[in-house]
Amino acid sequence: MIRFYNGLTLESAGLTENEVWVDGSAIRYVGLAREDMPAFEREVDLKGDLLIPGFKNAHTHSAMTFLRSAADDLPLQEWLEKQVFPREAKLTAESVAAFTKVAFLEYLAGGVTACFDMYYQPDAFVQVAKDWGFRAVMCESLTFGDDPGRVYDRYEKYNNMGPFVGYRLGFHAEYTNGLDTFRTVAEAAHHFKAPVWCHNSETKKETDECIARHGTTPTRLFEDMGLFEYGGGGYHCVYFTPEDMDIFARHGCYAVVNACSNAKLASGVFPLRLAVEKGVKLAVGTDGSASNNALDMFREMYLINVLAKLRESDAAAGDPALVLSAAVSGGARAMGLSDCDSIAAGKQADIVRIDMHKPNMRPVNNVVKNLIYSGNPSNVRMTMIAGRVLYEDGAFFVGEDVEDVYREAEKYTRQIVD
Amino acid sequence: MIRFYNGLTLESAGLTENEVWVDGSAIRYVGLAREDMPAFEREVDLKGDLLIPGFKNAHTHSAMTFLRSAADDLPLQEWLEKQVFPREAKLTAESVAAFTKVAFLEYLAGGVTACFDMYYQPDAFVQVAKDWGFRAVMCESLTFGDDPGRVYDRYEKYNNMGPFVGYRLGFHAEYTNGLDTFRTVAEAAHHFKAPVWCHNSETKKETDECIARHGTTPTRLFEDMGLFEYGGGGYHCVYFTPEDMDIFARHGCYAVVNACSNAKLASGVFPLRLAVEKGVKLAVGTDGSASNNALDMFREMYLINVLAKLRESDAAAGDPALVLSAAVSGGARAMGLSDCDSIAAGKQADIVRIDMHKPNMRPVNNVVKNLIYSGNPSNVRMTMIAGRVLYEDGAFFVGEDVEDVYREAEKYTRQIVD
């Protein structure tokens, strides 16, 4: 058993000075020091540092690290059609595994303990997750040309691969699929009583074209087709109307905010104030490194808040506590990892130690606002998943040499990008 | 002499594989390895890491660390009048020194080697700079009630305090001064042949009120009064008109961009594309921790670029190489530290080592874009000022225990904020 003491703990009800004891993969105890202390394998004196639930990156394309800084500052269509699609066509199982590992290292160094991924080569991807012990939930990525019937086999296969792998029904987006796909996925949702996910209203063009094509927004189209009977959600949701928000709220769907990607691609700014007014559940994601380019949940949380202020022309807009909760808890629930959503006895031990002894965290007037407005990955001292320390004090414990990971990724990148 | 080798160096003309040799406070040699190697005190194998000139934080109020996370998410006027001004009235020399030290630690951990500061208690502030060996240039902060004549004594005094301290003529802003102050400062500018600085066009309200009061924008008013005869510049410059940009370009004035502060206070977005079209010189600053809240030049550079994209609704807007140059070189020249503006023989050794072995820097498709779009302070391995290593691998070498610095800052913060 591992004991963390002499620090702060972010629990669902707020900050406490409780200790946290981890036993195997789970949290055994959260509370004050007791008379009847068990024998501990390791006792960590936090020296005032903060424990938080790990960040859940609720929308990403992890293996896109190979396109980091390879195709920036271009108009959206040119970027997709000339820089992204032709290169993605060259991906193999080996290269996806190599690129995924770089992303997982970045997640660990930034306090991310789970990702909700959508990409190619799912077998190669989940193998890395299993080998390293990183929580990876995949969203089905159906697009034109794919057989939508594959969701049945995949659902069974990937949801029975143990604690680090999951699979959720979905498809890429409205504009990359026809009604037949939506019908098949809706049937599967009813069959499995499962939520459905996709990119939704990321750009104005996409949203306008859906209205021209189907006479309604993507969100209402999906609701009309019965896709949200068991919940689910959307990635981006930048051009959501008040009615779209109502639909999401009614079905308990999650809007996953991708502020950095939407900014870098000049897509727009998520209407945070509207979403909060409408009671829509929120999660936070980085999107892939091609459009971000970092996989940094601190920067996402920061940007969601300050862009809300710019969008509303109101310095009082934004809500740091709510955005932090979305990043650590909302994301977990969105992905179906409700046993990883908080620091509480019985929950999985997916825990991050935040270094409060770095100058950007001082003085301490408000811990949560320090995290949101001043925090960055240099504040992550330790990342634990399922009770295992995978990152601590700059070192990775993933069973592979980091330099080997970089070498492989560089090799495949040069083959694809140059 | 210290030798850095086996890495990359960001020189004015671009990236090279040159070595850098540092002798005393200056750079002795930048070039390939040679036959006639001198004896080195220390040889640093960079292992592929990158050397860049230190970031120059070209607008800040360093000692405002005491208000970090103390007063966020409020409308601007309420923030200033209820949270900031009454607390600043309680500042003393001792507390300003303590708060300044926290800021300097954050600068060092983030690769910042010089700051252009405007605040209270200048003697306390410059003492920290001298004691630690951190480059601090002060901008005069004249406001209603101050004697503008003080600029003469201060100019002589602070510009003769050695290599780590400087003083530039200026005043707080148009809306906090009368015409008499501008006349006095203009006379001083002519007397010393010196540039003039101030906050300029930060908010729409301030700009509109100047037009109502004086019939012209702050920038044209300042030009009309002869304040820019020897250059200078402005902080923020969010509401600059095309004519204001022309005026700045004509006088070689610098616009210091403060993207994070302008976003958090919902002030607006700097018109980067217009400034570049008009040929205005640029520098980058964080503003103070009350309105940012981090003192993080990576986040500033990132935000300047992505906000330019959102402002123009064009993913091709922004210019990472130009913004990086503004942050490391433009700022130095703006502050009058032209001997600290680049890595070249004869220049001051103000150098930062960027860790290219962190996952957010991999793979390496484009080093500059990695820095701007993926970089964060965890990538700073070493910060050197005037040939002295003040920060390396998480440790500070400033002649004081960091925990003592934090304790003092917390003590004074509690006295003022609570």
Image (cartoon, coloured by chain):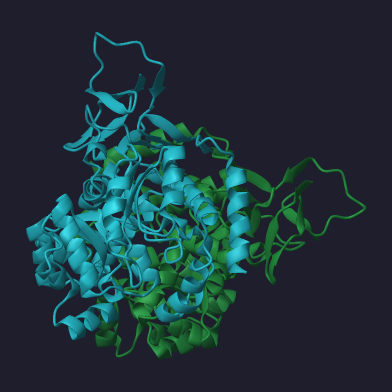
Chain colours: A cyan, B green
As drawn, B240 above or below B404: below
As drawn, B43 above or below B113: above
Question: Percent x, y for residue A123?
Answer: 43, 50
Name the image quarter holding residue B265: bottom left
| Nearest the eye: B375 or A359 | B375
Question: Percent x, y for residue B4?
Answer: 74, 50
Instruction: Report the label total.
Output: 0
The answer to whether residue A316 is visible is: no
Q: What residue appears at the point 77 percent right and 43 percent down from the top-left corner?
A: B43
The answer to whether residue A360 is visible is: yes
Question: Percent x, y for residue A65?
Answer: 49, 58
| Residue lying farthest to the top in this orientation | A36
Q: What residue appears at the point 64 percent right and 65 percent down from the top-left corner?
A: B341
The answer to whether B187 appears left or right of B2 in the picture is left
Q: What residue appears at the point 56 percent right and 58 percent down from the top-left corner?
A: B158
Give the quadrant of the C terminus of chain B: top left
| Nearest the eye: A296 or B113 | A296
The answer to whether A289 appears left or right of B262 in the picture is right
| Nearest the eye: B305 or B129 | B305
Question: Percent x, y for residue A96?
Answer: 50, 55
Name the image quarter holding residue B366: bottom right
The answer to whether A353 appears left or right of B357 in the picture is left
